[in-house]
Amino acid sequence: MNDVLLRTENLGISFGGLKAVEGLNLEVRKGQLYGLVGPNGAGKTTVFNMLTGVNLPTEGTFFLDGEELRGKSQEAINRKGIARTFQNIRLFVNMSVVRNVMVGLHNQPEFHCNAFTSMFRLPRHYEEEATMRDKAKEILKIFDLYEERNNLSCNLPYGKQRKLEIARALATNPKLLLLDEPAAGMNPNETEDLMTIVRRLRDEFDLTILLIEHDMHFVSGLCDEITVLNFGQTLAHGTPEEALNDPEVIRAYIGN
Ligand SMILES: Nc1ncnc2c1ncn2[C@@H]1O[C@H](COP(=O)(O)OP(=O)(O)O)[C@@H](O)[C@H]1O
Ligand SMILES: [Mg+2]
């Protein structure tokens, strides 16, 4: 069972009377591209919120590489190796593209600028700054955003902002990347381009990716396994072909 990276055990959360997620048992193996799908309000983003320390689960728990992470802070979970993007893009709009990626790099121990060296602008501060900038530029090249590195992130077209968010998450050097509707609002060309990037992240960066997406071409084209949620419950699980053809899943989608 060593190849399991993420395991959730009966994971769930209630908001007041509403059980937003209930009894979720996921097993995501290292190197897998895994899909989490379901109609709006199914609880998908809430799963990400629990896995990143935004929401504390009210039942069950979860493990990364065998280590229980339930109850840890967002920063601690990120340092342990889980990074995410948001359904609604969250960038530092008044910062340049390259700076946004450098913010992600700050979480890595090698760049943990201590307040003393940065406050007094000691040589070590400038060295770190330069190294971080170089690393950020390398990351931008993967996403074909290098040319735009000095633009303000708010001036990027929407599809590129989505890619920049992934670049920033990648900069935290995660083991597991959570993508919340990464193709939302993208045109077909941008979506194809993103599929290629997601495959590269797995193949070249040894990443495991759990993604939420409504575009079933995207999900079926990338994921070898999916879980379908509806009203917080697990409706089906298996290959995209198996799970999406499950009669209960078809009913859930038609009913919505
Ligand atoms: N912090 C919160 N407080 C109260 N209700 C919430 C909160 N977060 C999510 N919910 C509710 O949980 C349900 C699932 O939401 P969400 O996870 O965003 O669904 P999805 O991402 O699948 O569209 C919704 O009914 C939503 O209103
Ligand atoms: Mg959502």
Image (cartoon, rainbow, N blue to C red):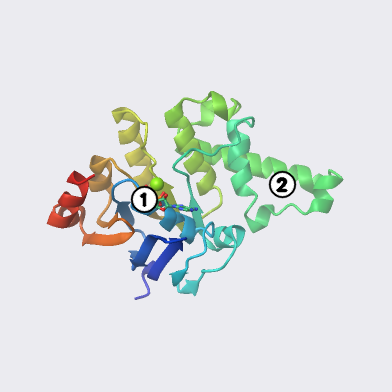
Asked whether 94 or 160 is in front, the reply is 94
Q: Is residue 188 left or right of residue 164?
A: left
Residue that extends furthest to the right in the rendered view of this protein: 120
Residue 198 shows in this picture: yes
Look at the image and tell me whether residue 246 can be seen.
Answer: no
For label 2, the SS is: helix
Say which quadrant the C terminus sits in.
top left
Q: Which mark is residue 128?
A: 2
Task: Indicate the position of residue 101 as horizontal and vertical percent values.
Answer: 58, 41
Q: Amino acid at mark 2?
A: Glu
Where residue 81 appears, as percent x and y from the top left, is 52, 60
Q: Going 66% across and 44% down the picture, which residue do you hit?
A: 131
Which residue sits at x=52%, y=26%? 147
Task: Examine the rendered structure and indicate whether residue 136 appears above or below residue 1.
Answer: above
Q: Residues within 10 Å of mark 2 (few under 14, many from 20)?
A: some
Q: Amino acid at mark 1?
A: Leu
Q: Of the numbered discs in the image, which one, if any, rests on residue 234?
A: none
At 34% from the left edge and 76% from the top edge, which residue is drawn? 1
Please say if 112 is above or below 102: below
Q: Quadrant of residue 40?
A: top left
Instruction: State the residue at coordinates (51%, 69%).
Output: 70
- The single residue placed furthest to the bottom in the displayed view is 1
Dot 1 falls on a residue whose secondary structure is strand
Label placed on residue 211: 1
The percent position of residue 18, horizontal first and vertical second, equals 40, 59
Q: Is residue 127 left or right of residue 196?
A: right
Q: In the displayed structure, does residue 187 sit left or right of residue 17?
A: left
- Looking at the image, is mark 1 or mark 2 nearer the viewer? 1
Q: Residue 71, how many percent across, how many down?
A: 55, 68
